[in-house]
């Protein structure tokens, strides 16, 4: 059998292909050496003996002490507490920013070290609460049901046990682990927020509506007319770097992504690449966060209250691998509005926009568990994700009427047919010599001779927006319907 074909560099040549065919026939006729099961002479790696052991070990679920797990969580949340970090410089050690934070840490640590009852070896108070609350969330359990079982467990345990008596007490112990939110008062008519420079006002500057509900004189606490919830973004982004798992995943887009010609991830797209070229300083650190922003209304009461709608605003980091970045664990709710804000959504976006601006210009000092050092984390919103009606609210481009298309802008082909707006002219995007361009009867009776509408750059759109005068917000202000720039 000739073996000259093996040296032929062109593996598609007839000589090479014929050679392979002859070789397979030869192998079929004569068989192969049975002991040659690992093809180490043909590129296959010989398994080192330890690695096969390791695979076997991996497949067995490791037995982890729940007490250790809870301690890991506490260390992740309070990075200044872990002592085994290799720091090169003193100032790289994260320090507790607030003394309140340190107090919370100490309280959690106390509960983590306290036995559930004297002599109990398997559960600390904190481990017991964490496991019970985990079950409550995993198998959606009402507070009432949870309190009932907690009462039963408490009676089962020795009398001097430290199990909390209800969900409120249990939640209190866990408070230090969670992330809080701010309540910001808003004008009843959505004109403005009582926030920052307007925090001390009692009436709305635009419609003069009172900030608080009318209550009897002897009430000491005032009840606000409307409240929005704001969940600060910075601590949530910082948490992504508090665990080695998520800190590794947040670098995925740069360090693990396969960069070839195939489009399968936002970083493969032109927008991402253009952003990197425009802001090389931001792009240089893969830990800087690229966010998407999404909003839509939904009705949590279903048929019970048809008129209500709740509007959450979410952001999510695109740094993560595609199988994670759209998971609910990584979606961060930042704003919660308890009614349809309509065109006043900008009013409610203000705290988020303020924080995003600060994250873009100044960033926030963040502890990175993977390197054990502090760094300045910055963030940018790359895309917004909305359905068409919400798009109009967020972008201010009206998605109704003759010029509804935010891509074609004034160059849209639209008309009024059968008592509806119709948008035509899609054939403009076809290649110049495409046969469908010549067809008239099959479409609207015309051949298509126009080029595709031009693309607008971000700067041009910003310049157009700056020319607009965004009138005061709110229900009481009469305002022309959404604008077409
Ligand atoms: Zn008002
Ligand atoms: Zn269009």
Image: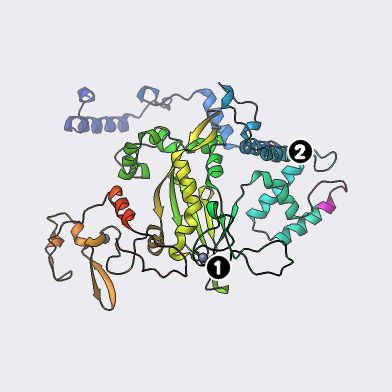
Determine which quarter of the picture holds residue 103: top right
Lateral position of residue 97 relative to residue 248, left or right: right
Q: In the rendered view, would you say 313 is above or below 47?
A: below
Determine which quarter of the picture holds residue 214: bottom right
Q: Position of residue 199 (x, y in %)?
A: 57, 54
Q: In the rendered view, would you say 364 is above or below 162?
A: above
Q: Is residue 123 visible?
A: no
Q: Nearer the viewer, residue 440 or 42?
A: 440
Q: Residue at x 32, y 29 (%)?
A: 30
Considering the numbered disc 1 on the image, is that residue within a helix, a strand or a loop?
Answer: loop
Q: Position of residue 125 (x, y in %)?
A: 76, 43
Lateral position of residue 240 relative to residue 15, left or right: right
Instruction: Give the numbered dot on residue 110.
Output: 2
Magenta span of residues: 154-163
Q: Residue at x 84, y 49 (%)?
A: 157
Considering the numbered disc 2 on the image, is that residue within a helix, a strand or a loop?
Answer: helix
Q: Residue at x 73, y 43 (%)?
A: 126
Q: Main secondary structure of the magenta part?
A: loop
Q: Nearer the viewer, residue 312 or 8?
A: 312
Q: In the rendered view, would you say 274 is above or below 412?
A: above
Quadrant, the N terminus: top left
Lateral position of residue 168 relative to residue 334, left or right: right
Q: Position of residue 106 (x, y in %)?
A: 72, 37
Reading the image, the residue beneath label 1 is 209
Q: Is mark 2 within 8 Å of ligand 1?
A: no
Q: Residue at x 62, y 39 (%)?
A: 77
């Amino acid at each position: 059998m000739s073996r000259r074909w093996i040296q032929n560099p062109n593996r598609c040549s007839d000589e090479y292909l014929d050679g392979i065919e002859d070789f397979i026939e030869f192998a079929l006729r004569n068989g192969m050496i049975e002991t040659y099961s690992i093809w180490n002479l043909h590129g296959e790696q010989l398994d080192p003996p330890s690695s096969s052991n390791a695979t076997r070990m991996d497949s067995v679920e490791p037995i982890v002490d729940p007490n250790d797990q809870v301690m890991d969580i506490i260390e992740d949340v309070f990075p200044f507490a872990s002592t085994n970090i290799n720091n090169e410089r003193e100032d790289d050690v994260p320090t507790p920013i607030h003394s309140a934070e340190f107090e919370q840490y100490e309280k959690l640590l106390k509960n983590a070290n306290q036995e559930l009852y004297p002599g109990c070896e398997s559960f600390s108070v904190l481990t017991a609460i964490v496991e019970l609350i985990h079950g409550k969330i995993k198998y959606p359990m009402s507070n009432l049901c949870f309190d009932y079982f907690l009462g039963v467990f408490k009676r089962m345990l020795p009398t001097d046990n430290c199990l909390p008596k209800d969900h409120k007490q249990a939640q209190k112990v866990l408070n230090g682990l969670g992330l809080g939110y701010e309540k910001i008062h808003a004008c009843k008519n959505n004109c403005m927020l009582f926030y920052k420079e307007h925090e001390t006002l009692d009436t709305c500057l635009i419609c003069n509506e009172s900030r608080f509900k009318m209550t009897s004189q002897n009430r000491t606490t005032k009840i606000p007319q409307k409240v929005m919830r704001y969940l600060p973004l910075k601590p949530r982004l910082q948490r992504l770097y508090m665990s080695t798992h998520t800190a590794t995943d947040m670098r995925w887009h740069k360090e693990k992504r396969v960069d070839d010609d195939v489009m399968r991830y936002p970083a493969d797209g032109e927008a991402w690449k253009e952003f990197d070229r425009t802001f090389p300083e931001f792009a240089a650190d893969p830990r800087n966060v690229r966010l998407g922003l999404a909003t839509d209304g939904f009705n949590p009461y279903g048929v019970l209250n048809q008129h209500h709608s709740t509007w959450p605003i979410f952001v999510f980091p695109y740094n993560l691998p595609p199988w994670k970045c759209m998971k609910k664990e990584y979606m961060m709710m930042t704003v919660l509005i308890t009614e349809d804000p309509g065109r006043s959504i900008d009013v409610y976006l203000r705290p988020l926009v303020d924080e995003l601006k600060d994250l873009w210009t100044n960033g926030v000092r963040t502890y990175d568990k993977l390197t054990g050092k502090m760094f300045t984390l910055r963030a940018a919103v790359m895309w917004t994700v909305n359905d068409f009606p919400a798009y109009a609210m967020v972008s201010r481009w009206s998605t109704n009427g003759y010029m509804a298309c935010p891509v074609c802008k004034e160059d849209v082909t639209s008309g009024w047919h059968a008592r509806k707006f119709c948008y035509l002219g899609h054939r403009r995007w076809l290649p110049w010599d495409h046969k469908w361009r010549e067809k008239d009867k099959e479409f609207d009776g015309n051949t298509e001779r126009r080029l595709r509408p031009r693309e607008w750059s971000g700067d041009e759109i910003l310049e157009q927006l700056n020319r607009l005068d965004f009138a005061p917000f709110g229900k009481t202000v009469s305002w022309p319907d959404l604008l077409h720039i």
